[in-house]
Amino acid sequence: MKKNKYTIDDIVSNLNKYLDKEVDNLYSTYNYIKVFYNEEILNFVLETCYILTTVYADIETINASLIYKLLKTDIEKDLINKFDETVIKIAKGAYKLDKIIYSTENEYLIEYYKKIIVGMTEDVRVIMINLSSRVTLMRNIDIYDKKEQKVIAKESLEIVAPIAHHLGIYKLKSELEDLSLKVLKPDVYYDIVEKLNSTKVERDALILKMTDEVKKILDSHDIKYEIKGRSKSIYSIYNKLDKGRKFNDIYDLFALRIMVSDEAMCYLVLGLIHSKFKPIPKRFKDFIAMPKSNGYRSLHTTVFGVNNTLFEIQIRTFLMNEVAENGLAAHWSYKEHRSASNLTSTDQKLEFFKTVIDRYQDKIDTNVFEEISDDKMHGNIYVFTPKGDVIELPSGATPIDFAYKVHTKVGEEMVGCVVNNKIVPLNYSLEDGDVVKINTSKQSNGPKLSWLKIAKMTQTKNKIKSFFGKERKEEVIKFGENTLEKYLKKKHITSKELLTDDNLKKIFKEYKCKDIGELYFFIGSNKITPKSIIDYIYPKEEQFELKKGNINKNYNEIEVSGLPNIKVNIASCCNPIPGDEIIGYITKSNGITVHRIECKNAKHEKRIVEVNFKEHTDNKYLTKIKVFSSDNATHLADIISKLSSSGIVINNVVTNIVNLKYNYVISFFIKGKKELEQMINNIKKLNYVSDVERIMK
């Protein structure tokens, strides 16, 4: 590392440009810590601090960046006494991230380490130190041997640079990408540099000519502005070339950026430019009305400029430009000259947490993560949608709260929930970092009143109550009537038999209903169930008589040779379904148990009886399959969606990971073997599925 590349004076000078807070005490910090560092580390720390000032880091962050490498040394206690709580907290976070040993062996680990960085970071300023430190490392990478350089560059490109992108700190992102490409593909890097240099005179001339034309337009309307030619990063040019584009076809090598005073002026400038230069419609993007998740705002348009050359033009306010270059910190420091100490507010945490998602929930055993618990956020939890959007919920919130927070319609159509690739009940307490997928169906009958006892948030409860308001009452009544009819049909009871005058009097008195409409409303809103009504009106003996000849219940479609009306059970070890060859054996106290003929649990039984599924069956039967994935990405949501679209009723899903590859044990209800075989064949056709097998214990 070059000696005295940056000094404490350089750092203070930069800080004074955007902070009016007293920064002279930074000299005291510097004089205190410099005796504990050797020259190489001191230069590294100073360069990191200087980079932080270019992205508007606050004074607490600068102090923390000077001291964090001294934690866990003999002077740690002295540091804690000398600096305030905020500085120490940021420094501790930076120290922990500094100790992580990354791995980029596969996409699984790359995504996992992004999540680790999020999980260990309560304060976004910790990430800013980590990014700046990585830029310093890449700038001075020649102190390492070639093999180590490639490892560091790959980490920087695949783990660290994307996080700079998520935070909107494009200045650091672009530098990390360019420096990494220089190490990983030097031939490509220098070839692009050479091409840029060889065309520089021509490009500069065109940009100057276009700039003059745009200036004439703006000056004629007395608009105050600043205009710059924009250079495209080497790495972004490489990406386009890598996708098959030719160097001469990369249109946004010619680009202008226009900064004006306010949003309204942005749109005025856009209109003026379009009136002079013909735009390409599909290349217009309005990131002011619809900002990116990391806070980026700007208008982008591509026009046929001078000499009929395509120019990309970005139009933004001065503040938008600072945010685009420097990320979140610019929100607080630019022009307002105030401390960025509120960087830890919930909204700003979300700007970062929103875009980084852990798609894989398995933990890696490493000592550094034992310290994460100190950095957990309190009061609220932050959970993710499968697309990576973050949802803030109170501690103890359930999938019902999550669904309604996403959208009321999602809550009303919810039929189940998958958390971290596992099916969970609706009363499950969500935890920080959970990835939550709500299964919905347009055939859903809406929320249940019982959800009011499960929901945590008042807002959720109010939405559920609203569903059962007057405007929905007729719908709920009709639903309740249909629900009762379906249940009675299943029990072979007619509504005429149940709803006699005498029975209705008993029911109204027992359930405090004033009329039949209110009874149906209570059933439709799940306040009472058809089963409870039947159990109340008909004693068990009467129910037995009503069902006489139907003892087999759900499995009355199995014929037992010579033994009519005997109790039949389906064996859970092999789960036979219609179409399987089956046998039955007589148990001592539980009727007949039916197995698949190849089941090992039935092979040695002596009390065998012939059994058969009836030719026409209406019921669905439980079975299990195991789906083997051929890669290390999770496809559970896709598989569940495919099953559900085929009318399959899923009972349970268990996810396993073996050698970083997923397999899923799925139990579900199905009509028979023919349908099962067709479904298995459909799943096998998925390009990420290596095999599917039916499970038998």
Image (cartoon, rainbow, N blue to C red):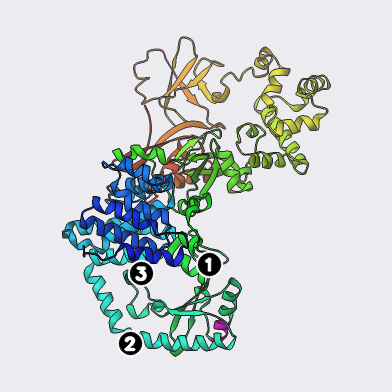
Q: Earlier in the sequence, mark 3 or mark 2?
A: 2
* Crowding at mark 1 (Cα within 10 Å: few <14, some 14-19, many 20+): some
Q: Please, what secondary structure does the residue beneath circle 3 have?
A: helix
Residue located at (36% from left, 84% from top):
203
- Which residue is at the front of the view, 675 or 649? 649
- Which residue is at the front of the view, 337 or 430? 337
Residue 314 percent across, percent down from the top left:
49, 75
Residue located at (35% from left, 38% from top):
371
Residue placed under numbered mark 3 in the picture: 236
* Crowding at mark 3 (Cα within 10 Å: few <14, some 14-19, many 20+): few
Residue located at (31% from left, 84% from top):
199
Instruction: Pick out the residue farthest to the top.
Output: 588
* Crowding at mark 2 (Cα within 10 Å: few <14, some 14-19, many 20+): few
Can residue 478 be seen at all in this image of the molecule? Answer: yes
Residue 275 percent across, percent down from the top left:
57, 85
Residue placed under numbered mark 2 in the picture: 201
Q: Earlier in the sequence, mark 2 or mark 1?
A: 2
Q: Which residues are magenta?
A: 272-276
Q: Which secondary structure type mostly characterizes the magenta part of the structure?
A: helix
Q: Please, what secondary structure does the residue beneath circle 1 have?
A: loop
- Which residue is at the front of the view, 243 or 169? 169
Q: In the displayed structure, would residue 530 be above or below residue 409?
A: above
Residue 5 percent across, percent down from the top left:
26, 66
Q: In the displayed structure, would residue 171 be above or below residue 249?
A: above
